[in-house]
Image (cartoon, rainbow, N blue to C red):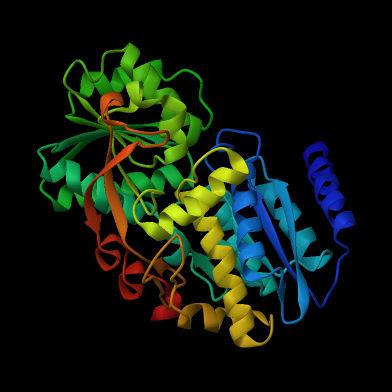
Amino acid sequence: MKPVLLAAAATSALLLAAPASAQGVKIGILNDQSGVYADYGGKWSVEAAKMAIEDFGGEVLGQKIELVTADHQNKPDLATSIARRWYDVENVDMITELTTSSVALAIHELSREKKKIDIVVGAATSRLTGDACQPYGFHWAYDTRALAVGTGGALTKAGGDTWFFLTADYAFGYALEKDTSEIVTANGGKVVGSVRVPLNSSDFSSFLLQAQSSKAKIVGLANAGLDTTNSIKQASEFGIVSGGQKLAGLLMTLAEVNGLGLQAAQGLVLTEGYYWDLNDKTRNLGERFFKRTGRMPSMIHAGTYSATLSYLKAVKAAGTKDPDAVAKKLKELPVDDDFAQGGKVLANGRMVHDMYLFEVKKPSESKKPWDYYKQLAVVPGDQAFFTAKESGCPLTK
């Protein structure tokens, strides 16, 4: 009960600052703020949502926009308890960010039951708009399919035709391994083995030894956050890369590259849906975020900004916060903001936009702070993501 009480207390403190109003629009950021994904999303995603609310003007339909937030600690039962209270007692209209696929799947189902909008940003599993899709659920920023097409496809085509996976032992890891394996085999490669690794592991030695003994050309890291940075650091100690194998960070963002540093991360190939130095719009968001936080936003932070802004635009366009009307508008309106340009939302709730294949620069190539990536390719959205029909979403049959 202690984590639930702590989360409830944190939420209540925020609500004291902004009294509950059944008529106003209330948005909840539910994510990991203290654990393995705290840098990946965490308080930085909260700041991104605040930026979106401010940019929108702070009001919609003549009512103040309120923001509440809580730490789910990567526990689906805790997350569900918080979300249920938000929906039933605190009149929260939409929940977003939702780091951790097991959490996102649980909240997705609760949102269906309660007829409330959720927009997943931080979680990766493509099941959210596949077999687990529902009328009020949306998926922004990226998913396991897009990561697989970008990083998995590129490395296999470049000759990395044998793979061994270090897979996070929960829904996200399984989906990322599955989607990447399908892309690898479709491009003529072969998966020679995999091992499941508990979330928030501190010792990767036995798992890395299995990867090393497999002789696979590519060691696919189907994990994220601190698990990815720790596995890369320990892989260096075991001589994985110096021994001729290549590491593939299947879900890495700017936050993890920054945590590793260019000396350790140089040469890694990764796929993201956003990079602050891509164009004028991404730079605008990045530089404003930097002034507030002292760091550049990752795909997750920028995606949370976009998801929050898109929800508010849909409420305004619908003229109501009724979930059916808002869901309809979310699927009709284009997504054109500082995160994505030319994005569209499919019938299954998947927001489709271009993804980017990057290589992490060598320290000598970086010309300024946060200058970490060189772009290798653009992966068009209609290639990166499943179509609504391909996704297996029951809503589209």
Left or right placement of residue 143 versus residue 376 in this view = right
- Number of on-image labels: 0
| Pick the front one: 58 or 344 | 58
Q: Residue at 50% across / 46% down in the picture?
A: 297
Residue 365, located in which quarter of the rendered image? top left
| Pick the front one: 263 or 129 | 263
Q: Is residue 295 above or below residue 137?
A: above
Q: Is residue 22 above or below residue 180?
A: below
Residue 264: x %, y % from top left: 34, 22
Q: Residue at 47% across / 17% down in the picture?
A: 203
Residue 331: x %, y % from top left: 47, 79
Q: Is any part of residue 305 visible from this angle?
A: yes
Q: Is residue 261 above or below residue 168?
A: above
Residue 60, located in which quarter of the rendered image? bottom right
Residue 182: x %, y % from top left: 24, 51
Q: Is any part of residue 197 visible from this angle?
A: no
Q: Quadrant of the N terminus?
A: top right
Left or right placement of residue 74 versus residue 244 in this view = right
Left or right placement of residue 299 versus residue 192 in this view = right
Residue 330: x %, y % from top left: 52, 77
| Pick the front one: 182 or 342 | 342
Q: Quadrant of the C terminus?
A: bottom left
Q: Residue at 69% across / 80% down in the picture?
A: 321
